Image (tube, rainbow, N blue to C red):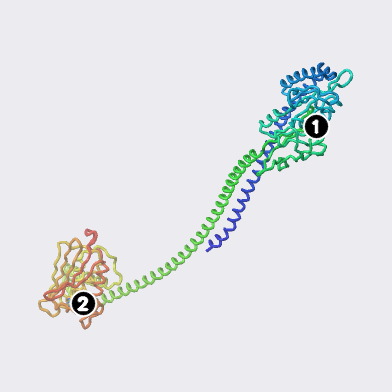
């Protein structure tokens, strides 16, 4: 009942958890991307910075090497002589000499210009585009050298249209300048070297115009920092070809973008060429895309993995926590339920207990009542027996009392006659008579006593003797023959002797009643035993029991006698049951009735057989 809303409520935290996890992972990836990009850019910057001096040195070295040529020519006596007095033959010889020199030094063209600006001798004087005779007085490298002694100019060749670096040196004579020696260097080899490095390199003049570069298409492009396009064009003495801006733009992380999609990125490093080319700048661009992409990819993947791992671990910890909490709640609920059930069960049990106690009490009371009733019935039966045998007992006692009377009278006479020994014999007889009376009264008293002794080992024949003794007077008066059938030794049963006698008295009285008036009347008391138990049969030759009476024989108040109570057999069979035995009517054939009392043997048949009577 509590799980429904709890589960529904858990959806929100789960969604929020997912969102947080996604944000954490995305944040980690973004941070990793930024960090790795910054690291990669720093690395690229480092590479660009390292490449820059090498690229600059390649160019400066070439300039330095080539600069020597015009300087050396300026001091050459033949050069001075030729410029001072030019003649065709000397110029041709000088051309050959210059050709040899240019070939050795890897220069493009070596040539000498007179003070008027006209070329006097050139290493290419044998070529169709020979410089000889051309006037370069307008070239800055000429005018500046005439003025300053040396000059350097990057420009397109007027005839060849090939770009090159012009290095010039003034040739001085004793009377003043004689002209200018010039070397044109085409920087193809340097530019090719730059290209081979894998980096993009470009140089620029003070006006912001690209000069020598590893990207020929960028030559004469304008840098964003250029000052004045016209001034730049003038400085290079370019024609009217429109100048385009260099296709580079600033990009994030201090990189520059070369356009395209995705844009080609570069890490730039810029510097100056120094004294070899005053005012020139040089820039190295290190391609950045691959390095940045791979660094970023690695970092992002790593960050994703780590963040995911972290999220999983945190989620696991949180789940564990919530699982523990859920289990605790479940345990508490179970505990409460258990306590409730135990309480219910305890209550039910104590109710049942009370009910049981009540029932036990009830049953005990009922049993007590039944026991009391039984006792009272037994007592009533005994008193009734006493009533019936009282006449016989009186008769029994009368006889010894009369005898005592006679013995006492005789004893007086013996004493008077001086025969004390005869008197003493009479006294002895009186004593025995008194004992006999005592015995009879004791038997009656015992029988009448309500309380009985607990069951003990009883020799069954002793009980038979006791019962016959109680009925002795009546038996004698009736003249009935009592037959006894015994075993050699009386069987021992566990019983209360008085109870046993009560049963036997009941049976004998019924038998005496049944045979009353018959001349051949007899009653047989037969005891037989086997391993299982002891059987005592009381048989008579009376009229027997009618079958309708036989059916209700052991029910209370069933009697055919005028003064009968109808309790004798009921009580006797009850007592037999109490003793662990049974009293039954044996199937009768040929008249008379036979009752069988079955009893168990005593456990120890050797124990005391007669100790019940007091
Ligand atoms: P009561 O002797 O007071 O009638 P009992 O329970 O002893 O009560 O006997 C019940 C009846 O059983 C007697 O009234 C008698 O009719 C019958 N009865 C008992 N014993 C014998 C017997 N040996 N022969 C014939 N009838 C008997």
Residue 190 in view here: yes
Q: Which mark is nearer the camera, 2 or 1?
A: 1
Residue matched to label 1: 279
Q: Residue at x 56, y 61 (%)?
A: 8
**CA neighbours of label 1 inside 10 A, class few (<14), some (14 to 19), many (20+):** some
Q: Quadrant of residue 471?
A: bottom left
User: Outermost residue toward the right?
Assistant: 175
Q: Can you give x and y, in whole percent of width and height, for residue 212 in the image?
A: 74, 32
Q: Position of residue 357 (x, y in %)?
A: 41, 68
Q: x and y percent of residue 341 in the render?
A: 47, 63
Q: Residues within 10 Å of mark 2 (few under 14, many from 20)?
A: few
Identify the image quadrant of residue 73: top right
Q: Looking at the image, which is closer to me, 190 or 272?
A: 190
Provide the secondary structure element on which disc 1 rests.
loop
What mark, if any, has residue 525 been given in the picture? none
Name the residue tied to disc 2.
551
Left or right side of 223 for 411: left
Is residue 134 positioned above or below 591 on the image?
above
Ligand 1 quadrant assignment: bottom left
Q: Is residue 586 above or below residue 224?
A: below
């Amino acid at each position: 009942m509590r799980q429904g809303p709890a589960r529904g409520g858990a959806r929100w935290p789960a969604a929020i958890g997912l969102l947080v996890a996604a944000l954490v992972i995305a944040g980690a990836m973004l941070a990793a991307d930024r960090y790795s990009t910054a690291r990669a850019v720093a690395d690229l910057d480092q590479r660009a910075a390292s490449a820059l001096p090498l690229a600059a040195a390649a160019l400066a070295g070439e300039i330095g090497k080539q600069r020597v040529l015009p300087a050396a020519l300026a001091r050459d006596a033949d050069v001075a002589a030729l410029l001072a007095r030019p003649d065709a033959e000397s110029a041709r010889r000088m051309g050959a000499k210059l050709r040899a020199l240019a070939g050795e030094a890897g220069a493009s063209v070596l040539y000498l210009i007179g003070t008027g600006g006209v070329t006097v001798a050139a290493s290419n004087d044998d070529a169709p585009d020979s410089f000889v005779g051309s006037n370069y007085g307008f070239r800055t490298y000429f005018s500046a050298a005439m003025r300053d002694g040396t000059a350097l100019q990057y420009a397109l060749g007027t005839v060849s249209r090939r770009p090159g670096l012009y290095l010039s040196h003034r040739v001085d004579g004793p009377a003043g300048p004689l002209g200018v020696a010039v070397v044109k260097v085409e920087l193809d080899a340097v530019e090719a070297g730059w290209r081979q490095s894998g980096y993009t390199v470009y140089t620029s003049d003070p006006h912001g115009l690209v000069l020598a570069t590893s990207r020929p298409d960028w030559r004469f492009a304008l840098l964003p920092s250029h000052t004045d396009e016209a001034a730049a064009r003038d400085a290079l003495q370019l024609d009217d070809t429109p100048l385009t801006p260099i296709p580079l733009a600033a990009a994030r992380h201090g990189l520059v973008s070369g356009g395209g999609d995705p844009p080609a990125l570069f890490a730039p490093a810029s510097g100056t060429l120094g004294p070899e080319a005053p005012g020139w700048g040089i820039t190295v661009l290190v391609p950045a895309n691959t390095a940045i992409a791979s660094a970023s990819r690695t970092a992002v993947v790593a960050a994703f993995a780590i963040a995911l791992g972290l999220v999983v671990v945190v989620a696991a910890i949180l789940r564990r926590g919530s699982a523990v909490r859920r289990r605790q709640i479940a345990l508490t609920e179970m505990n409460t339920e258990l306590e409730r059930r135990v309480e219910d069960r305890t209550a039910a049990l104590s109710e049942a207990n009370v009910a049981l106690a009540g029932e036990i009490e009830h049953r005990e009371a009922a049993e007590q009542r039944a026991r009391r009733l039984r006792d009272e019935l037994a007592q009533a039966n005994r008193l009734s027996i006493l009533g019936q045998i009282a006449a016989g007992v009186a008769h029994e006692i009368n006889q010894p009392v009369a005898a005592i009377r006679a013995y006492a009278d005789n004893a007086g006479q013996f004493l008077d006659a001086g025969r004390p020994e005869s008197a003493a014999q009479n006294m002895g007889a009186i004593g025995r008579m008194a004992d006999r009376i005592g015995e009879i009264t004791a038997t009656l008293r015992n029988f009448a006593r309500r309380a009985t002794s607990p069951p003990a080992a009883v020799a069954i024949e002793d009980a038979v003797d006791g019962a016959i003794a109680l009925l002795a007077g009546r038996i004698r008066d009736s003249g009935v023959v009592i037959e006894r059938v015994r075993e050699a030794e009386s069987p021992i049963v566990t019983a209360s002797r008085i109870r046993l006698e009560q049963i036997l008295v009941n049976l004998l009285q019924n038998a005496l009643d049944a045979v009353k008036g018959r001349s051949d009347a007899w009653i047989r008391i037969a005891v037989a035993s086997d391993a299982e138990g002891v059987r005592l049969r009381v048989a008579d030759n009376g009229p027997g029991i009618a079958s309708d009476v036989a059916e209700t024989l052991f029910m209370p108040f069933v009697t055919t006698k005028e003064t009968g109570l109808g309790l004798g057999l009921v009580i006797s069979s009850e007592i037999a049951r109490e003793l662990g035995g049974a009293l039954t009517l044996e199937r009768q054939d040929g008249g008379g009735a036979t009752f069988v009392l079955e009893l168990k043997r005593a456990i120890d048949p050797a124990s005391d057989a007669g100790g019940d009577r007091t």
